[in-house]
């Protein structure tokens, strides 16, 4: 079943009388359990597409269905609920609170979920274990290496058991060895059944995806299956 279904989706930004078109009639369907890499040069629209898919931005034309539901007809509260329950985000800059512990950072998405303190701790511990960071649970994020910070960010994205994990240039601030470890981890999560959408400009990173979407000037340039994708070799 399709998790995302976009038909002729566009996104225009208005600045005074100047209209900038970030997306121009993009149509794509993504099934549950896929690992999609979105590629393209700067200004191609890849981040805009991810933000629309993840309910951080809205489209100005076309149709976007999420799990069969028309996103355009949803209220702000419904969209906020989707962002909380259905999606997890991993960013290039990690976006962790420096003076909070690993566990506190991972628990952040659970604050408004109506869970008990015990339930929040249990979910956080499970997510932290999934990325191999148990030994750092009570360390502050400013005490971590870049790779460790990104693993914590992935744990935070996992904690609500979302339908999809969005990763925006997840290796952009990491050295090659550490970046490979993070990509191995994302591949392992995909093999376990998670849907992953990753924005990247790195060909080596895209090799981990099962499907590669390339954009140029806001339009679809290519959409190919990656039959020889790299498999994760991550070890906790």
Image (cartoon, rainbow, N blue to C red):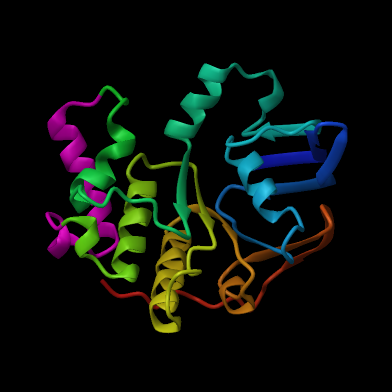
Q: Determine which quarter of the picture holds residue 223.
A: bottom right
Residue 122 lies in the magenta stretch: yes
Judge by depth and name the residue closer to the eye, 181 or 150. Answer: 150
What's the magenta region? 115-139
Question: Is the C terminus in the top left, top right, bottom left or bottom right quadrant?
Answer: bottom left
The image quadrant where one finds the N terminus is: top right
78 lies above or below 124? above
Q: Quick one: which residue is furthest to the bottom in this view?
A: 177
Task: Left or right? Give the position of 143 relative to 111.
Answer: left
Q: Is residue 1 visible?
A: no
| Residue 131 in sight | yes
In the rendered view, would you say 83 is above or below 125?
above
> How far across and how far down the image is residue 98, in percent?
26, 52
The structure residue drawn at horizontal position 38% and vertical position 42%, both measured from the top left corner, is: 161
Residue 106 colored magenta?
no
> Picture coordinates of residue 219 (x, y %)?
85, 54
Q: Give x and y (percent) for residue 50.
A: 63, 48
Residue shown at the point (23%, 57%) measured from the top left: 141
**Residue that appears at 25% across and 40% down:** 107
Placement of 12 over or under 141, stated as above or below: above
Seen as rendered, the residue at the extreme front is 16
- Which residue is more in the foreground, 118 or 153? 153
Tell me what residue is drawn at x 62 percent, y 43 percent.
51
Query: Measured from the top left, where is residue 120 in percent x and y?
Result: 20, 36
């Amino acid at each position: 079943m399709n998790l995302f279904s976009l038909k002729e989706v566009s996104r225009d930004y208005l600045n005074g009388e100047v209209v900038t078109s970030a997306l121009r009639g993009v149509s794509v369907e993504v099934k549950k359990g896929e690992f999609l890499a979105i590629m393209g040069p700067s200004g191609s629209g890849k981040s805009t597409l991810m933000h629309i898919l993840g309910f951080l931005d809205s489209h100005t034309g076309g149709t976007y269905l999420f799990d069969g539901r028309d996103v355009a007809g949803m209220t702000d509260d419904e969209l906020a609920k989707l962002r909380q329950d259905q999606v997890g985000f991993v960013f290039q800059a990690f976006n962790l609170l420096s003076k909070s512990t690993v566990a506190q950072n991972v628990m952040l998405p659970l604050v408004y979920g109506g869970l008990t303190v015990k339930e929040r701790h249990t979910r956080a511990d499970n997510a932290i274990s999934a990325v191999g960071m148990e030994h750092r649970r009570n360390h502050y994020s400013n005490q971590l290496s870049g790779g460790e910070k990104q693993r914590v960010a992935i744990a935070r994205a996992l904690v609500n058991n979302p339908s999809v994990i969005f990763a925006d240039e997840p290796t952009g601030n990491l050295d090659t060895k550490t970046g490979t470890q993070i990509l191995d981890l994302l591949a392992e999560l995909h093999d376990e059944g998670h849907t992953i959408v990753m924005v990247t400009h790195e060909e080596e990173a895209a090799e981990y995806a099962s499907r590669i979407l390339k954009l140029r000037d806001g339009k679809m340039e290519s959409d190919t299956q990656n039959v020889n994708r790299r498999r994760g070799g991550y070890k906790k």
